[in-house]
Structures are given as C-alpha cells and as structure tokens.
Image (tube, rainbow, N blue to C red):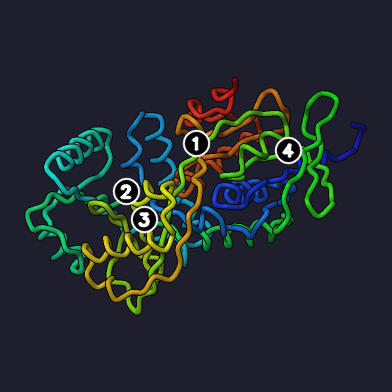
Amino acid sequence: MGIGSVKRPVRVAVVGVGVLGACVGWNLSRRGAEVVLIDGGQAGEGVTNWSFSWVNASNKTVCRSYFDLNVAGMAAHRELAGTIGPDSWWYPSGHLRWAGDPAAEAKLLAAVELLTGWGYRAEVCTGAEVRRRLEPAVTVPGDAAVVYYPDEGWVHGRHLVARLVRQAVASGAEHRFGVAVHDIGTGADGSVRDVALSDGSRLDVDIVVNAAGPGAARIAGLVARHLPMRREPGVVTRLDCVKVPVRRAMHAPGIELRPDGDTSVVLHSREVDALIDTGEDPAELARLLHESARHVVPELGDCPIAQTRVVNRPIPADGFPSVGAVPSVPGYYEAVSHSGITLGPVIGRLLAAEILSGERDELLADFRPERLSP
C-alpha cells in the first residue's frame, strides 16, 4: 500500500439474519466493517420467530464450558438491553420449573444443587408459594417443589432482530432480504472472494459469516466444508389472549409456556415434538399443546390457537455451537448454534472481535468449527 493510502474497511457478508446473524452483523457494523446482511426470507422470521426464546443457563449443565458460555450470554443480554434499550424485546422476568413425579423432582433438585454450587441463583419454593407470590393463575400442587430462577427470562426474537438490523443499517450496513446465496467464490489461495445471489447479483466480499441456521450445512457446502447437523424438529404454537394470564416463562410437566407480549402466549413441549415424525397433523399437535397448557393454566382454555409452525432447530452434530474461523477456508466463519436466543449477544460480540482483530476468546475454545472437521 502506497504512502498516504487508506486501508478500506473489511467487507463482510452475513448469511442468515436470525438472532445470531443480526447480533454478528450489528457488532461488526458498529465497529466499522462494511456489512451486507443476506437472508432468503425476512430478518427474524425463521427459527428465531419460532423458538421458545428462553434465556437461561440452568438447562446447559452438560459441561462446564457450555454452562459458562450461556451465563456469559445472559450477561450479554443485560448489556445489550442497556445499549439499545430493552423495550419490546427483553423480558428478564425469571423462570419457573417443576416436575410431575418423585423421580423427576429428585433429578430437578439435584440439578439445583449443582447450579448453586456453580454460583447460579436458584430458589426452591412450594407450589402454594408460587401461586401466592409469582403466578396466581397457575395450577400446581401446593406441596410441589418449584424452582425459581430469578436471573432468567425470555426474548421477543423478531423484535430484537428488527432493532439490531435497523441500527446496523444506520451504521452503514446493507441488506438483501428475499434472496438466497447460490455460490461462494474463492481465490487461487482458497480464500473467500465473493458471493453470488439468487437475483443474479454477485458481491465482492472479504469475509462470509455462515449464520444460516437450519440451512448452515448447505452454505458450508458451497466452500466444500462438511458441517454435520442434527435433524431435530420442534413445534411451537401461539395462542391469542385478551389478557395474558402468566408473567414469566415456565416448564411444567409435559408443557412449557411463556408470554409473547400482552395478547399472546407461546407453547412448546418435547413430548409433542416426539410426534412430529409420526406424521401427525400440525393442527393436532397444536391441539395437544393447548390441552396440556390448559391443565396448567386453566384460563388458557379460552385462548384460541392463532399460529403453529414446525421448524428444524440449527444444531451441529455433537449438540454444541460451531463458532469461529474454519482454517481450511480463509475468510469463512461459522455462527451456528441451538440456544441462539441465549447465545446471540455474546457470540455476536466475540465473533465480531475475532473477525476484526483476530482475538480468539477462551469462552469459545471448546466450540471451534475445526472440531467438526472430518
């Protein structure tokens, strides 16, 4: 570069604009990168909009490094709310969980002991205390052990993505929505050079971030990268309510539910998910979810089913995130993970720093893409 020349900003294509892609793109754009946000649909309307959207680390105890990453994700949400404002997307209202039989309750209480030993806040109370203090509309046995996690919450994913995209665009980012990535071009040295889109355009870029969620394996294949993914579909139903009778996310036996704003409730169940591959009609799955929810919160029986969607969760084969550079393809990065709602803000911050400065944070050490290479 000659004397007096100015180095141009790095140009990054973020492929997939759900919560992970939006968090990565927003962090890059605010740090001076030239960002193009690309999505085959509309931002935040895919899996992000059809997730239970529970922000937590209490369900992430399979290994300490994954737990620590999710705790950092919770803290990053609080930081993000302070930066962009919390209204319409951030609901840190806590979370309740209880079990349906003695064996499951013993397992739940053992998990609480582990979590509190790791410094995680959890309060064990009775069903009667929950109805009196926290959720008067909930039907739970008075002597049941209910765990309250006060630092957890939920996110309105579509609203969060919309806000991040607006702010990224205000910082100079472009967006191409409703167009798919058909090809990723590489140079003679194997490094990323450009992306070709389904509208016939081709964009010169230095970096590609694969945040394509359930479509991440296809995008990886465009650079001859094999990204093994699980097939794990889930069904989510929304109810319309004149007034939402619950205040926070909760896991009851056989059903999980949470508010979704002032006039909607979201329902999900692992037990109902297990029926998806039996060929059961989604309308019947929604009915089963509604029936289970009605037993926990009787007022929900009067709330009609509004929408139901079956989506594939974006889960790498070993169940853990794939985040960071792929050494075999210079300029290609991955941001692929289940629990994207919890992890979006922390992954967005850490991956943007890695792209722009080469900083590799130890929080991501166990979740590097190379572990999934053949």
Q: Are marks 2 and 4 in contact (CB under 8 Å)?
A: no
Mark 1 lies on a secondary structure that is loop
**Real-space Cα separation, disc 4 to disc 1, in angstroms:** 26 Å
Is any part of residue 239 visible from this angle? yes
Q: Which residue is mark 4?
A: 207
| Left or right relative to 169: residue 59 | left
Give amino acid for label 3.
Answer: His
Give amino acid for label 4.
Answer: Ile
Q: Residue at x 57, y 58 (%)?
A: 44
Decide which of tag 3 and tag 4 comes sooner along the chain. 4
Q: Which residue is mark 2?
A: 271
Q: Nearer the viewer, mark 2 or mark 4?
A: 2
Q: Are marks 3 and 2 in contact (CB under 8 Å)?
A: no
**Real-space Cα separation, disc 3 to disc 4, in angstroms:** 36 Å
Q: Is residue 73 above or below residue 291?
A: above
Check the image and name the residue furthest to the bottom: 242
Q: Position of residue 12 (x, y in %)?
A: 73, 43
Q: Position of residue 249 (x, y in %)?
A: 32, 58
Decide which of tag 4 and tag 1 comes sooner along the chain. 4
Q: Residue at x 51, y 34 (%)?
A: 316
**Real-space Cα separation, disc 3 to disc 2, in angstroms:** 9 Å
Q: Residue at x 45, y 33 (%)?
A: 319
Give amino acid for label 1.
Answer: Arg
**Real-space Cα separation, disc 1 to disc 2, in angstroms:** 18 Å
Q: Position of residue 38 (x, y in %)?
A: 70, 51
Q: Residue at x 61, y 45 (%)?
A: 212
Decide which of tag 2 and tag 4 comes sooner along the chain. 4
Numbered tag placed on residue 337 in the rendering? none
Q: Which residue is mark 1?
A: 230
